[in-house]
Amino acid sequence: MTAQHQNCNATAELYVVQCPGPSLCGRDVIQKLHLLPDQEVGTILTPDCEISSVTEQLKEKFKDLFELGTGLMKGPPASIAMKKDATPRFLKARSLPYALREKVGMELDRMCQQGILSPVSHSCWATPIVPVVKADGTLRIYGDFKVTVNPECDVDQYPLPKMGDIFASLKVGYWFSKLDLREAYCHIPLDDQAKQVAVLNTHKGLFAYNRLPYGIASAPAIFQRKMEELLKNVPGTQVFLDDVLIAEDKNSYGKTVNKVLEIFRENGIRLRKDKCVFGAQEVTYLGHKIDRHGLQPAEKKLGTIVESTSAQKCPRTQILPGPDHLLPQFSAQHVKSPCTSVPVATEREQMEVGI
């Protein structure tokens, strides 16, 4: 048969079927009659394609946040409150394995170039370093402040959120994003008094911190408070130190992420692109799997516990810290009766299973 639309004519095949419903126009006829722009015909934009497109747009728009280097937060510098009778402690540099000397020296140079450290010639305080080699072969330098500064400081008190509170506050979530800050604590500058206290003693001499260091007892509270202040007016976000979790409903992916990234840009924050997750239907956060169905323990965290078979004759919940003890909130028995006590294994039962 011949089909006509406006000034276009086309020969088309017509199929008659015995079923109720409206008449349908096939793709071949749509193309011949130019009912839609050519580039839109035959293209089905799935939700995954939309999410991927939005994600790429966000990464391109905020690509400066993923650049190498340490960010610097705007705002007043952090202080390390010391006790009134605090006595300065100066400890000598610890010996390093020769295999680590070069790596430690290179890391100290990098930290100086990034403005995290500054060399100093003298100090009343000095803390030995603890070099830690990470899985990827890179080295991270920490100060062993538990033997110097921490016993003499008034620890800043600020609560870290619990996992249950984090999940409850997210309410609605279909798409989840997770942002990881690059050298998180080092985003926050120190005041002059704190710089005199946070000093490292190394084989290359003394280095004073210009940024908030890991290992200071007050650092987690200082950083958590600062991050919560930044995101307090953004619903659907939760922060636990350097991990930011964002939950968005099915039809609004990208809006909250865009707002958070705008705030980070305005405040000089840098992110680790390799550890950030955008627009996922489930994410692992603080050892738990979160999706639109709820909160569950991450499977890899349960492997050793679930596969444990050492207890044969005695219920393992009596002798081992199994999943019912380590993760009671996910136990059906806990839900039915959270106050139910578990009997302790007798001495004979312990001997039978080799305890």
Image: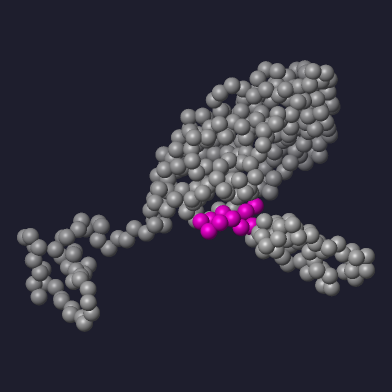
Range of the magenta residues?
A: 287-298
Q: Residue furthest left?
A: 7
Residue drawn at 39 percent across, 51 percent down: 251
Residue 101: image location, x then y, percent: 76, 36
Is-magenta flag for residue 50?
no
Determine if residue 273 is in view.
no
Total of numbered circles in the picture? 0
Q: From the image, which quarter does the N terminus lie in?
A: bottom left
Residue 139: image location, x then y, percent: 70, 40
Say left or right for 280 vs 189: left
Is-magenta flag for residue 289?
yes
Say left or right for 197 vs 173: right
Q: State the predominant SS element of the stretch in magenta.
A: strand
- Nearer the observer, 299 or 275: 299
Residue 318: image location, x then y, percent: 82, 64
Q: Is residue 147 above or below residue 292?
A: above
Residue drawn at 59 percent across, 53 percent down: 284
Q: Residue furthest bottom?
A: 18
Residue drawn at 23 percent across, 79 percent down: 19
Picture quadrant of residue 187? top right
Residue drawn at 18 percent across, 71 percent down: 23
Residue 130: image location, x then y, percent: 77, 36
Picture quadrant of residue 128? top right
The colour style of the image is one colour
Determine if residue 155 is in view.
yes
Q: Is residue 195 above or below residue 268?
A: above
- Nearer the observer, 120 or 2: 2
Q: Is residue 285 above or below residue 344?
A: above
Q: From the image, which quarter does the C terminus lie in?
A: bottom right
Say left or right for 152 vs 254: right
